[in-house]
Amino acid sequence: MFADCGLTSVTDAATFDAISTRIHDAVLPKLCTPLQQYYAEKLEPMLRQNMEASCAGWTNNAAESVNYVLKQRVQWRVSQMPELIGKCRQLTDSQYTEADRALVGRSDLVLCKGYACHRTTLDLWRSLSERQKQRLHNECFRIQSPHTTSTSTDGMLTVNSRSCAGKKLRPVEARCGQLW
């Protein structure tokens, strides 16, 4: 499940289903009933959701890392909820500041190849209004939806669709008259 070729690293539904079937056939029968139920009711649906949200490869390490940072922020002490919320807000604000620094190349962090086109100069950044900076920030760090849209043949309806979703083929007679 958690190996490089396991469910946590899968990026498409067909592969996920194939590995899941193999786990159901070879691994689950060897487990006790509570573990089988946990896998079927909790773990597998969560891993499928991660795959569908393009979050394949997610591990608990990221959550543990943030947990450690939060504990450092509160100096390993029990906090009241409002204080903890304030610390989380400070942490989030500092992450936004680091992201802005990465946009202008003034950070230990750098934009990966797919986002490098959003990089700007410090002089240009200084000349932008807060609204323009926010727009630039949003364009760069917007979560990309893995979905595309499909429009009905009459053009009256457009819906989100998955790239792996099936398409109904039109009859050959209807296709023959069109230029491809």
Image (cartoon, helix red, strand yellow):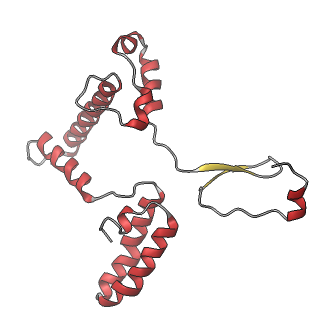
Nearer-the-camera pick, 147 or 177: 177
Rendering quarter of residue 120 = top left
State left or right for residue 145 relative to residue 78: right
Up/down of 110 relative to 29, above or below: above
Residue appearing at x 28%, y 34% in the figure: 95
Nearer-the-camera pick, 1 or 66: 1
Rendering quarter of residue 175 = bottom right
Give the position of the N terminus as an image quadrant: bottom left
- How many numbered circles are shown? 0
Residue appearing at x 46%, y 37% in the figure: 142
Q: Position of residue 3 (x, y in %)?
A: 29, 68
Residue appearing at x 32%, y 64% in the figure: 4
State left or right for residue 5 relative to residue 73: right
Q: Position of residue 29 (x, y in %)?
A: 35, 90
Q: Is residue 123 visible?
A: yes
Q: Is residue 141 visible?
A: no
Rendering quarter of residue 114 = top left
State left or right for residue 62 relative to residue 55: left
Up/down of 100 relative to 81, above or below: above
Up/down of 36 relative to 45, above or below: below
Q: Position of residue 52 (x, y in %)?
A: 48, 59
Q: Position of residue 148 (x, y in %)?
A: 61, 49
Nearer-the-camera pick, 119 or 82: 119
